[in-house]
Image (spheres, helix red, strand yellow):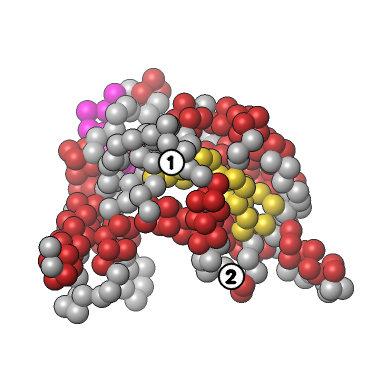
Amino acid sequence: MTADDAVQDEATRLLRALEHRFGEPVPIADRTPLGLSTLRAIAERRSIRDYDTGRAVGRDLVRLLAAVALSSPTKSDLQQRDIVVLDDPVRRGRVTALLGERWIETAPAFLVFCGNNRRQRQLQEWRGRSFPNDHLDAFFNAAVDAGIALATFVTAAEAIGLGCCPISQIRNHSEEVSRILDLPQHVFPVAAMTLGWPARPGAISLRLPLEVTLHEDSFQEHGLRESIDAYDRRRAAVQPYARQRYEGDYGHAEEYGWSEDKARQYSKPERTDFGAFVRSKGFNLR
């Protein structure tokens, strides 16, 4: 394959992945940018929950990926994000038991991404400076920093052929996880992640059409209901749900798409104690 053929192949795969994901063509600019392979890899990404459990992910490799992830943007260079790599089988077992999923327990590697506003407060104390920013933004900045690091870790891991799956469910057990990991005040879990070599490819999840989530100049909701209805039909045809959520409460729906699943999910209380947990970590959320 020539260099031009390789570029064309990457472009074709990128276009195909985006059209599959969004249900519409997303044209590439006439002057094709460098980095097509990176764009294609991100467009093709998929959550992996089925790993080759006989193939380890070495500590040095995890450390390398963490270093790349922690090279990501951070608000005002405050660097308010940490990664806890759980190698100790006892601690890891206690955390993964809370999540109750076999694929999480057996994944070759398991990490927890944390927001850390503690270091900044320590700096203020060590330097004899006041801390007048003890409000919601302190928590928010640390949480966003951790999310950026997590997303960058995903991109780095998948670039070398690893698969991963972020797990927000860990926040269902924030207090217990915090205790197991010895997280001090102003440090909190944002998400966990499994990591390993894929045993088989996952599926590319369909996303809402760009007309719903991509705005020009101002926020728009024209035709939103119709767009989501069409997306529901496409999801049901291409990527149907294996089961209907809370079927005992809501019955079996003849047409079950994304919006019905999400409406059912958020009809039940989730993480109602999370605000209290964050306050117990010393954050003032005013």
Magenta stretch mostly in which secondary structure? loop
Quick one: 264 or 190, which is closer to the camera? 190
Q: Residue at x 47, y 26 (%)?
A: 102
Q: Position of residue 4 (x, y in %)?
A: 14, 71
Which residue is located at x 39 percent, y 35 percent? 51
Separation of marks 2 and 1 at Cα, in angstroms: 30 Å
Q: Position of residue 127 (x, y in %)?
A: 84, 73
Which amino acid, mark 2? Lys
| Residue 146 visible from this viewpoint | yes
Q: Residue furthest top?
A: 248
Q: Is residue 70 above or below residue 199?
A: below
| Number of numbered labels in the structure image | 2
Residue 112 is drawn in which quadrant? top right
The residue wearing badge 1 is: 196
Residue that label 2 marks = 75
Q: Residues within 10 Å of mark 2 (few under 14, many from 20)?
A: few
Q: Is residue 160 left or right of residue 235?
A: right
Front position among marks 2 and 1: 1
